[in-house]
Amino acid sequence: MQRFKYIAFDSIKEEVEFSLEKVFEPNRSDIWTQYPFTIEEDLGGNTFLFVKIPIAGEEMELQLDTGSGRGLAIAEELWGRISKKVPGVKLKEGKDLYPYIGWLACKHDVLPTLQVGDRTVKNAMISVFPDDSPLLDRCPGLLGMQFFRDTIVVLDFQRNLMWVKGTLRPTCR
């Protein structure tokens, strides 16, 4: 089986690009941020991608769920670590639906802003699940594509990097 060199999710144009031959090279590295990822396989042969990315200034390793339009689904323990950095949150009791699992009890809210890597995401959806939730049996949280709906994300399998396109970052002189 041939492996992809990269997959690009262009949420602005609503396109996905798969490359079997070409290696990803950003046209301007000063407008891209990189986050390392690992790929793991469970006993059933299911593959999961875990990315290291700061959320609210806290470095964490989360499962990247490219099929989810939601924002962040995390365990209570992880929420305890970052909640102090996210003022004004009023989590409400609720349930979220996840394919293959069903409806799961959680607490959720929409945050006016949330720092995700180098990006400030507006109207960030967050769901907090009990630490023993079946959703989080492999990781402390899931990162959905809601946080990247206004940009381009590239999964670079040659370097095991997730590239996120941003705006020009100032350089020190």
Image (cartoon, rainbow, N blue to C red):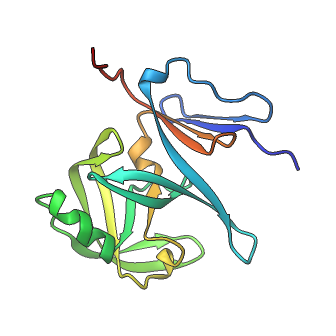
Q: Nearer the viewer, residue 83 or 110?
A: 83
Q: Residue at x 24, y 72 (%)?
A: 80
Labels in figure, total? 0
Estimate the x, y position of residue 12 in percent, counting from the top left: 47, 30
Estimate the x, y position of residue 111 in percent, counting from the top left: 22, 54
Residue 48 placement: quadrant = bottom right
| Quadrant, the C terminus | top left
Q: Residue at x 31, y 19 (%)?
A: 171
Residue projecting furthest to the left:
88
Q: Nearer the viewer, residue 136 or 112?
A: 136
Q: Residue at x 18, y 57 (%)?
A: 86
Q: Residue at x 41, y 34 (%)?
A: 150
Q: Nearer the viewer, residue 130 or 105?
A: 130
Residue projecting furthest to the front:
173
Residue 5 placement: quadrant = top right
Q: Is residue 151 above or below residue 143?
A: above
Estimate the x, y position of residue 149 in percent, counting from the top left: 43, 40
Estimate the x, y position of residue 73 in percent, counting from the top left: 39, 65
Residue projecting furthest to the top:
173
Q: Is residue 30 left or right of residue 119?
A: right
Q: Is residue 39 above or below residue 171?
A: below
